[in-house]
């Protein structure tokens, strides 16, 4: 079991929602946390709100699809804290449409943001972790990437790809003290899901054995487990879905 005290964690897409909850949980576990979101104002605001912890929060805006923006993020973190111990690839978008109606732009935007970004962000950070001989990478996948979902061919494909990336990095870097795991959220209570409307939400909840939507904190707890307690666990995908498997 690893202590997270003073470990440096980068959480992408952490301005709000699941990402913010992950950042807060890591912070409460003792880590120093980098808040990073494409929305600059949201990044600064969230970092400011969480920074009552004595300078252990850094806000750095980042477009995870842009290589230069990623380089700026890493340079800023390195200048402030000199190392990165934990990476949580959480940034993601949806552009839902039935497969035959899905445009190439809808497809590519989701692949770029939800999958290719993880490749772009993880690669330089893995170099740092390899030198340290220590690292914890947690990718936020989805049950959709395992089971599929109507109207989400792009999202399901991206998350399935992220799971494949997770398992491959786990194999390649285990000998260097680096673990790589994925958390696959089910139906989670966020701004995005609330936008679906009460009727659709109720239909989803009826299918969940635990009888409720998950909370962002439920996902955050799984991330903290992989980042701290799960030193001998790598290449795994943990579904956090209240028992909803189909």
Image (cartoon, rainbow, N blue to C red):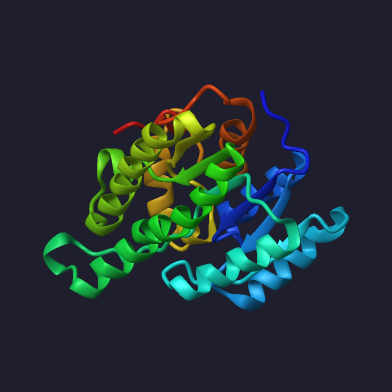
User: Can you see residue 190?
Assistant: yes
What x and y, as percent, mark residue 177?
Answer: 54, 31
Vertical side of 244 occupied by 192: above or below: below
In the image, is 196 to the left or to the right of 136? Answer: left
Q: Residue at x 66, y 23 (%)?
A: 1
| Quarter of image, res 12 | bottom right
Q: Nearer the viewer, residue 112 or 187?
A: 112
Q: Nearer the viewer, residue 110 or 178?
A: 178
What x and y, as percent, mark residue 151?
Answer: 24, 57
Q: Residue at x 37, y 32 (%)?
A: 171
What x and y, as percent, mark residue 135?
Answer: 57, 40
How many labels sit on residues? 0
What x and y, as percent, mark residue 231?
Answer: 58, 25
In this view, the residue farthest toward the left is: 100
In the image, is 20 to the left or to the right of 203? Answer: right
Q: Residue at x 47, y 60 (%)?
A: 192
In the image, is 80 to the left or to the right of 54? Answer: left
Q: Residue at x 52, y 74 (%)?
A: 69
User: Can you see residue 62?
Assistant: no
**Where is the C terminus found, in terms of image quarters?**
top left
């Amino acid at each position: 079991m690893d202590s997270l005290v003073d470990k440096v964690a980068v959480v992408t897409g952490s301005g709000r929602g699941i990402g913010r909850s992950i950042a807060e949980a890591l912070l409460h576990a003792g880590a120093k946390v980098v808040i990073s979101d494409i929305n600059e104002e949201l990044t600064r605001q969230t970092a400011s709100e969480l920074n009552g912890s004595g300078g252990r929060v850094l806000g750095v805006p980042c477009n995870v699809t842009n290589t230069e923006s990623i380089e700026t993020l890493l340079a800023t973190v390195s200048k402030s804290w000199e190392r990165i111990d934990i990476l949580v690839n959480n940034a993601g978008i949806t552009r839902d449409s039935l497969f035959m109606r899905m445009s190439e732009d809808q497809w590519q935007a989701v692949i770029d943001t939800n999958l290719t970004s993880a490749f772009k962000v993880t690669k330089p950070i893995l170099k740092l972790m390899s030198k340290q001989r220590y690292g914890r990478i947690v990718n936020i996948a989805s049950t959709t990437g395992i089971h599929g979902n109507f109207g989400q061919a792009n999202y399901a494909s991206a998350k399935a790809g992220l799971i494949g990336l997770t398992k491959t990095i786990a194999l390649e870097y285990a000998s260097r003290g680096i673990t790589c795991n994925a958390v696959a959220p089910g139906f989670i209570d966020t701004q995005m899901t609330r936008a679906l409307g009460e009727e659709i939400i109720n239909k989803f909840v009826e299918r969940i054995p635990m009888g409720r939507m998950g909370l962002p904190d439920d996902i955050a707890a799984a991330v903290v487990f992989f980042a701290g307690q799960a030193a001998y666990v790598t290449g795994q995908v943990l579904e956090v879905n209240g028992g909803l498997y189909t």
